Amino acid sequence: MFKRVVSLLFVIALILVQTPSITEAKSNKVTEKIVDKVAKDYLKKLKTDLKFNDKTDVFTFYDLDDNELGYYYQFEKGDKSFFMLLSSNTEYSLLFSAGSGKPSIKSVDKGGKYYYLGNITLYEAEDASSALNMINTHLSEKSAQLSKKDLRTKKNPKAQARWEYYLSENETPAVKALSAEDEDSINGVRILNQWDDDVSYPASSCGPTTIATISEYWRTEENKSSIRGLNYYDSEADMINHVYDSHDGTLTGMSVAGVRRALIEHMTEKGSYSVTTDSFNNFSKYKREIRANRPLAIKFDDWFVIDDTWGDDYVFDYHWTTGVGYFTDDVDDLLYIHDSVGGDRYVDYRFHEDIITMVSVNVE
């Protein structure tokens, strides 16, 4: 009996040694080949004329724990360019951000790895500590220093189902159902440039530029002709400077309350319009405003504090933009925005939800 028990234990031990542990963690990483498929699909969905064959570069980027997080794709053709920051891990949204031009790249060490912490910015550094040190260097003395834990990339539990579509060879009916989409955008919103040579305080003019952008839309596209717009000023920069000087623009940016007040004051300076604003953070309400052809001011405000060096090291974590559209399905909720620094941008709303404030505007 004893011998039989020993023999049985020996056989079990052999099986355990030869069989992978059932508790072994399943890899969440996907290959560049799979991400290529994702990129091809998004190029068809998003507002760009560029094709996958226009791809010029692909770079891997990492989180601050040096785990591979995704791929940066650059597309170029003639004078057109478009970028995508795509995940390569099924725990995250498929697309972090995309848009015309290139992402903002902050170089600590030339030739280093790319690190991604959110929005449209990549940090080029030899290691994660160097990237983190650069961020902390630009925080004000009163701000607490950040750790890797403070800058964890936000996961998306809904993304796994969409990743299964790309990982499976055959489309099942359940997976196909995920491709139902909803998208809309507002035409006629002109992109103004806060970094125009004649803008007096370009580094802190994102708020005034957003106010000028929205005001000009209502004047030209919604026939509110008494609003002071580009027909009144000598240039775009002149209008931005006026908003900055007349409506409490500061070197440390504009608050939500300040932008709301400035929108009302500016659009009623010359006309007897009724201007109402609201501030919130709700994607469904944002979609309703877009469908009603009312562009919004959107503030991204995380850990970054603007100081005198901000203009030299621009970071998207403290910034006003103009919301002009969206793309959504069962997994992705993307904001389509006009950025007064870089042009058109798609930004993953769920990834940045905690740092966003939306300001709606209506003029009657």
Image: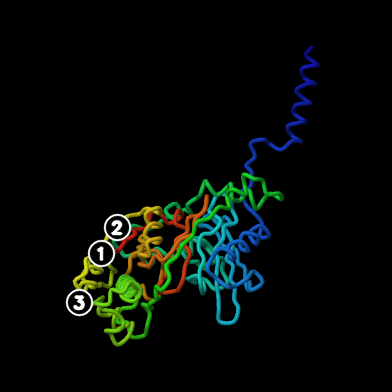
Which mark's residue is nearer the viewer, 3 or 1?
3
Residue 131: x and y in percent read 48, 64
Is 84 located above or below residue 269 in the figure? above
Q: CA distance from mark 3 to mark 1?
A: 18 Å
Q: Residues within 10 Å of mark 2 (few under 14, many from 20)?
A: some
Q: Identify which residue is drawn at 29% across, 80% down.
A: 239
For label 1, the crowd category at 10 Å Cα-Cα, with few meaning under 14, some 14 to 19 and many 20 or more, is many
Task: Provide residue 176's location: percent of width, then percent of height.
Answer: 62, 49
Marker disc for residue 260: 1
Residue 154, above or below 251: above
Measure the alpha-carbon separation of dots 1 and 2.
Answer: 8 Å
Residue 311 % position (x, y): 37, 75
Callout 1 amino acid: Arg
Mark 3–mark 2 distance (CA, rounded to whole Å): 25 Å
**N-terminal-most mark, 1 or 2:** 1
Of residue 299 and residue 114, the one placed in the foreground of this image is 299
Quarter of the figure with the N terminus: top right
Q: Mark 3 packing: few (<14 Cα in 10 Å), some, or many (20+)?
A: few
Q: Quadrant of residue 185?
A: bottom left
Give the residue type at disc 2: Ser
Residue 35, given in percent of the width and then of the height, sits at 63, 59
Q: Amino acid at mark 3?
A: Lys
**Which of 71/5 is in front?**
71
Residue tagged 3? 270
Q: Image point 55% across, 52% down: which residue?
A: 180
Query: Foreground residue, 135 or 180?
Result: 180
Read off the residue under disc 2. 279
